[in-house]
Amino acid sequence: MKMKKYIKILIIIIILIIITLIAINAEYTGSKVKSIIISSSVDDSPGDAPKNTFPLILFHGFNPTYSPRLSEFILRSMQNKLSQDLDYRNKGLFTSETTCAELRYSKIPIIIRATYLKQFELLEIEDYSKNVDKIILKVKYCTGADKVDVITYSMGGIVVRYYIKNIDNSSIRRLILLGTPNHGGLYNIGWFANYLVEDGKSRINLDFIELSENHDFMKSLNSGDETIGDIEYYTIAGEIDQKGDGLILSESVSLDGENAHLVVPCRHSLMNLPFICPDAYTFIKEVFSS
């Protein structure tokens, strides 16, 4: 009986995974087709966004499958909810085929989510930050906005912080770091990342290893000013066991000089879901309502 029960549960899980992958593929394909159609008939000239309007870009966190499509899906529910509650124009996914015609706006700023991953590439955070730079540059050019707002989740916050420190600290107005291990502080699986660090360097070139507090990358990222540039920094940490969110120590998330910090009773994997972690979502909505 127990074996039959486990088999049924396994079948249900497989079905849910298949449904999710189909939905992701449909959205990605639809967005890609739309981009191709528009690019054939509309120019790619820059936009002229009204002053004091800022596009909002959402960047995901670590994905053990390194799949761009799965990564793009992570912040979809937050994107949809923010577009409804704060009247952003929802632009879905940013892809390599996204045109200026799709990104331009005249009154209502856009909200779009993007991935810094590339297909079949296992890279390090520095490489991801270069991809973030390309995305932000294109969004700014196509919309005509002076700056963008950014929400990042988990490791995505480290990617964006590296971008700010080493590439450009003038293109972001507001930055929300959701469950980001800003000072390392991994636990439960943190021992594995620490094991793969030797003399401050990665034994193998994988992104999550650089999240270890023992890694030279993390030490360098936090040397000097932790909140660089004329940027509003906001951080959100989870706490479910008096230590953290089950993956990131809550004490690791806050930054010196940030504008505000919030601790919510949410697990790391659920912090990005507005209906499951409403405290985090309410905080985010209030930041962009001001």
Image (spheres, rainbow, N blue to C red):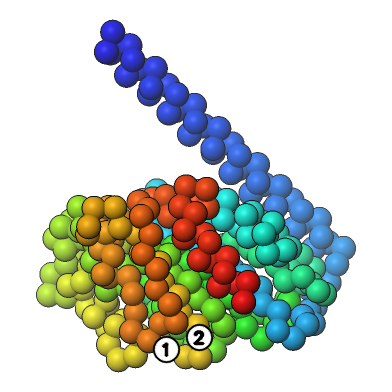
Q: Secondary structure at mark 1?
A: loop
Which amino acid, by three-letter code, is at mark 2? Answer: Ile
In the image, what residue occupies the spot 16% across and 67% down?
197
Query: Which sits in the foreground, 149 or 34?
Result: 149
Q: Mark 2: few, some, or many residues within 10 Å (few <14, many ≥20)? A: some
Q: Is residue 157 visible?
A: no
Residue annotated with mark 2: 231
State the residue in front, 121 or 169.
Answer: 169
Image coordinates for residue 190, horizontal then vertical, percent: 20, 58
Q: Which residue is disc 1 drawn over?
A: 228
The percent position of residue 232, horizontal first and vertical second, equals: 50, 83
Local packing at callout 1 (Cα closer than 10 Å; few below 14, some 14-19, many 20+) is some
Which residue is at 43% across, 55% downward? 271
Label pair 1/2, CB-CB below 8 angstroms: yes
Q: Is residue 261 above or below residue 170?
A: above
Residue drawn at 54 percent across, 79 percent down: 174
For the N terminus, which image quadrant? Answer: top left
Numbered disc 2: secondary structure? loop
In the figure, is residue 151 to the left or right of 123?
right
Residue occupying the point 63% across, 60% down? 82
- Residue reaching furthest to the right: 41
Kindly tell me whether residue 253 is visible in this rendering.
yes
